[in-house]
Image (cartoon, rainbow, N blue to C red):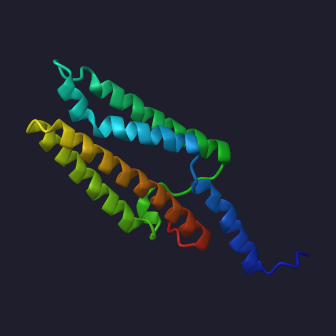
Amino acid sequence: MNDTPELDQVAEARRKLSVHAELPRTYWVLYGIALVLMAGIPIWASYLPGGLPDIQWALLAVTLAAAAYAVISRRRSGVYLPRRISAYPGARRLWVAVLAVSAAGIAGIYLLVGNGLRPAALVLLAVVAVVVFLGQVRIRARMRDDIAAGRVTP
């Protein structure tokens, strides 16, 4: 028989499971690059005379790659965590805040580029990218904490 109390065994199992909410550094590097490229689309398009042709195909490729990564990592680990952010109570508010910053930042970038203020748009792009990137890292940390604490809802 195991000398460890049952509640301690459950807590240890949750801690082991919470590791699966972490993402590798390569993912975060690629995420940061994709974030800057996608959020800066109006800036990059303003430098080209004809705009950015076929940008929809590039965005589709990035989206499909991200979805494939998620499916492959779930199958490889055998751990299927809830994908809805509403399942993680500690991450919900931060997710909404990061989403609001993203939307406001992209709208601001479009407005600045539309008014011919590309240098200001580049500065705003850097600020938005850093805030969103750090927010996403923090959201993942809160998801991990919710899993470890057993607060995840089905």
Q: Depth check: 145 or 119 in front?
A: 119
> Where on the picture, by quarter, is residue 136?
bottom left
Name the residue rendered at 60%, 43% in the picture. 73
Q: Depth check: 98 or 74 in front?
A: 98
Image coordinates for residue 10, horizontal then vertical, percent: 71, 73
Name the residue rendered at 51%, 36% in the picture. 68
Name the residue rendered at 24%, 23% in the picture. 52
Q: Is residue 116 left or right of residue 80?
A: left
Q: Residue furthest right?
A: 1
Tell me the quadrant of the picture where the N terminus can be found: bottom right
> Where on the picture, by quarter, is residue 42?
top left
Image coordinates for residue 109, horizontal then vertical, percent: 20, 43
Image coordinates for residue 12, horizontal then vertical, percent: 72, 70
Q: Depth check: 7 or 135 in front?
A: 135
Q: Is residue 83 above or below residue 48?
A: below
Q: Is residue 120 left or right of residue 73?
A: left
Q: Is residue 97 above or below residue 33?
A: below
Q: Residue furthest left?
A: 115
Name the residue rendered at 25%, 40% in the picture. 122
Q: Is residue 152 left or right of residue 11?
A: left
